[in-house]
Image (cartoon, rainbow, N blue to C red):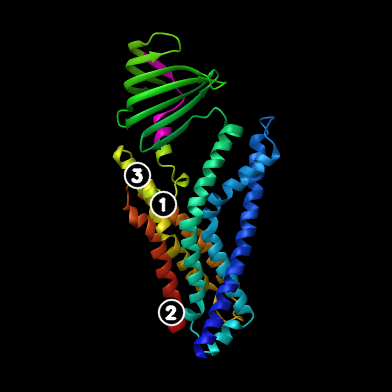
Amino acid sequence: MKNHMRSIVWRYIASSYLYNLIFIALVLLGLIMFFDIIELLRRASKFDNVPFWRVMQMAILKLPEVGQTIFPFVILFSAIFTFWHFNRRYEVTIFRTAGYSVWQFAAPVIAVGFAVGVVMTTIVNPVGTILIQKFNVLENNLIVRDAPQISYFENGLWLRQPSDEGYTILHSRKIDMNTKTLQKITVLSFDNEDSYKWRIDAPSGQLSDGVWEFKNANFTEPSEPVRENVDIRLPTDITASKIRESFADAPSLSFWKLPSHIRTVRQTGFDAANLRIHYQNLLAQPFLFASLVLIAACVTLRPPRTQAVFGLIVVGVAMGFVIFFLSNFLQALGASHQIAVPVAAWAPFLITVFFGAGVILMLEDG
């Protein structure tokens, strides 16, 4: 009978928290989508042929990626609201009278927070990366336009650069960013109607200021003899910094694909610290979500007649922002190799759980 009652209490607390979490998530995501639509409309207003439904589509595609950023706040705010609601209706007092400690009362909420973190890492993140890639394609085609596109796969580097006459696609099997040198290069040029114009094959090439330099290259045009061993200079808007940034574009990479991509980036000689921190953050995310529930419990599970309850709730919300900025600060330190990558990724969780557990222990047993 006792276990049955405990199961009912667990389901009641967990379902109440989950309902509040979904409600707050929908409200915050709706607000973010609203402001995203306004910003996209402002950017799209520079062009005449961007329909409103495309702007809506872009805002929806971007939403999961933005949602991952705000979800720690969703976890914290919904936990604060849930505990405050229970406390205001004296349900906490009833549970305490029935012999439940703060830990037992908070355990269902912690479990839900951890489970949501697992779902966010293993499902929402991979889906979000697919959608943000679609968003980037639409943004490049409809709003940014004429922006170079850079991708790196196991078979090498791919670059697409538009121009007034069409566009060029460059492929290199190897790249050395220290010397800005590419090896085993193929360049294909097309006009605005996607018709083939010419081709360059070169053993190596180098990126200088605003130009690709290919030496001992073969130049091929339709219905023309191949010009062999010629030096060619090809203008470009691509810079070495843009290539580096594309390698470390963590939001466009799925949690499941990050380990292999990190290995690929390391093999090319690039700095993978930012990607490693992002991967470790995703691993730590369920634990961070669970620890944020402890912060919520600290500031809300007080006697309902205590005058300082509202002030404590404000402190809890402020602590959420402090944890957010601390996490970003530690990530910056880790990316610049000032601290170790695991420390940069896991320190926010450790600080949060030790603080939350310490305060609860002091209030419960002090």
Question: From the viewer's perspective, is the residue at label 1 or at label 3 nearer?
Answer: 1
Residue 270 drawn at (x, y percent): 33, 39
Q: Classify residue 310 as left or right of residue 260.
A: right
Question: Which residue: 53% across, 79% down?
Answer: 10
- Residue 301 shows up from this direction: yes
Circle 2 residues within 10 Å: few <14, some 14–19, many ≥20: few
Question: Which residue: 51% across, 46% down?
Answer: 130
Q: What is the tally of numbered marks visible in this picture?
A: 3
- Find out whether residue 71 is within the magenta segment: no
Q: Classify residue 51 as left or right of residue 141.
A: right
For residue 362, the mark is 2
Quadrant in which the C terminus appears: bottom left
| Mark closer to the chain start, 3 or 2 | 3
Question: From the viewer's perspective, is the residue at label 2 or at label 1 nearer?
Answer: 1
Circle 3 residues within 10 Å: few <14, some 14–19, many ≥20: some
| Mark closer to the chain start, 1 or 3 | 1
- According to the picture, the residue beneath numbered tag 1 turns out to be 256
Residue 99 drawn at (x, y percent): 50, 89
- According to the picture, the residue beneath numbered tag 3 turns out to be 272
Secondary structure, mark 3, is: loop
Which is nearer the eye, 301 or 136?
136
